[in-house]
Image (cartoon, grey):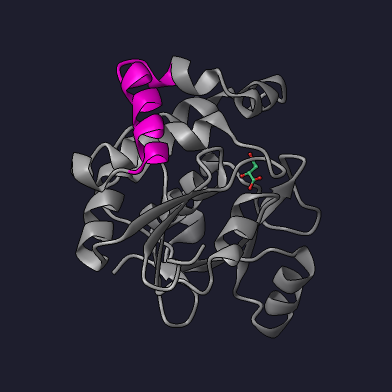
Amino acid sequence: MPLLDNCAVVVVDALRATTTMAKILEAGAKGVLPVADVEKAFSMRAENPELLLGGERQNRPLPGFDAGNSPFDYPETMVQNRLVVLSTTNGTQAVQRVERARWVALGSLVNARACAEAQRRASDQGLVVCAGTEGQLALEDVLAAGAIVSYWPQEFRTDSAHLACALYNRWQDDLIQGIRLASHAKTLIDQGLEQDVDFAASLNIYSRVPIRQSTGWFAYL
Ligand code: MLT
């Protein structure tokens, strides 16, 4: 990614990490820190027992953590004014892979318009990084990326941005059906997590964007 240094990067893991991190801040948390590995999360809490730990492996909450990776795991009563460290299989790893970028935000369908607007304020070069699943393209991420780039001017869109936009345009009037086509959505539904899938299809319910601070934590400005 040669342009990474100058780009305003939005990382997307629509099911479910970036949707859940947006929800965590929306519920009043002071900050959320995506970490790639579970041991790091535990060692951070050993230093600061006030930290909440969340995340998943195989989509299930991790033993010893306070919550999983469902947006419904983080009610206001739990996260208000707290700091949350989240470790997930793909999404938090994708955030780590773009750590060199000057500006990084967390995007999804829930905050697509706000992401595009914040990105354009931050730089004239925007990049959307889709986390995917285990190294494979994930339909739900392309769908959310398409929603974000649909708010970019046409002339700024690369071929991949046009493709993502075409997928979004196809499903924008029925995002629940669109997101349910994704294989990861089917897995989550099989595991009883249907409401997480449907929640992730809620377009623009949030008007703020989690943006990485100089500390590495993501917060609302
Ligand atoms: C991930 O980061 O791989 C996902 O958010 C998985 C999930 O919990 O659905």
| Most foreground residue, 152 or 66 | 152
The front one of 76 and 219 is 219
Residue 71 appears in the figure: yes
Res. 183 image quadrant: top right
Horizontal relation, residue 77 to residue 155: left or right? right
Left or right, 121 with reference to 15: left
Compare residues 96 and 27 and report the one nearer the observer: 96
Magenta stretch, residue numbers: 158-176
- Please check the rendered image and state whether residue 172 is part of the magenta-colored stretch, yes or no: yes
Q: Is 194 rendered above or below residue 73?
A: above
**Residue shown at the point (39%, 67%) measured from the top left:** 219
Q: Position of residue 18 (x, y in %)?
A: 49, 49
Residue 30 makes an appearance in the image: no
Measured as percent of width and height from the top left, residue 215 is found at 47, 82
Q: Residue at x 45, y 19 (%)?
A: 178
Please indicate whether residue 137 sits to the left or right of residue 212 in the image.
right
- Residue 139 image position (x, y, % from top left): 54, 29
Q: Is residue 81 left or right of residue 50?
A: left
